[in-house]
Amino acid sequence: MRFGKKGKPSPKYIESYKIIQMIGQVTYRPELPTEMSFVHPVFHVSMLKKMVGDLTLIIPVEAIEVNEELTYEEILIAILDKQVRKLRNKEIASIKVLWQNQHVEEATWEAEKEMKKKYPHLFV
């Protein structure tokens, strides 16, 4: 998920769980483990994905530290690339960032200025 940012969430899924009850036409109750007891147990069908067998999309629940507010902090792993976009009156420097629990294909472009504030040790 892209917490703290506007826009669509990234396509990440947490394990596969058996659907134990169909609440309505578009709402389901999966069988969640006890460590996910703080998560609301009913999901809209748009939040679920049929298990196809692509194990690279699945992240073990233990690998993500979700807090009580149902958020987690992404940890920057590496800077993959850098670019400068030129507009009419200014230039915007961006860096391609690889985050923890993501593949290289899912790396995002972030403003270099903001990343220098958050991670100054990477730009020394």
Image (cartoon, rainbow, N blue to C red):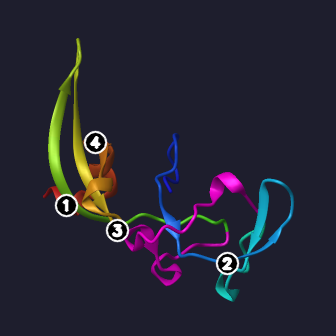
The residue where tag 4 is placed is 113
Furthest residue to the bottom? 34
Considering only order in the chain, which callout, 3 or 2, is on the residue closer to the N terminus? 2
The kind of residue on which mark 1 rests is Leu
Whether tag 2 and tag 4 are in contact, CB under 8 A, the answer is: no
Give percent across and percent down for residue 108: 32, 49
The residue where tag 2 is placed is 18
Left or right: 2 with respect to 83?
right
Is disc 2 surrounded by few (<14), some (14 to 19) or many (20+) residues within 10 Å?
Answer: few
The residue where tag 3 is placed is 100
Q: Which residues are magenta?
A: 43-68
User: What residue is shown at x 19% (from left), y 56% (from top)?
Assistant: 79
Q: Quadrant of residue 84?
A: top left
User: What residue is shown at x 45% (from left), y 74% (from top)?
Assistant: 59
Q: CA distance from mark 2 to mark 1?
A: 42 Å
The kind of residue on which mark 2 rests is Lys
Q: CA distance from mark 1 to mark 4?
A: 12 Å
Q: Quadrant of residue 103?
A: bottom left
Q: Is residue 65 magenta?
A: yes
The kind of residue on which mark 4 rests is Lys
Considering only order in the chain, which callout, 3 or 1, is on the residue closer to the N terminus? 3
Q: CA distance from mark 1 to mark 3?
A: 15 Å
The kind of residue on which mark 3 rests is Gln
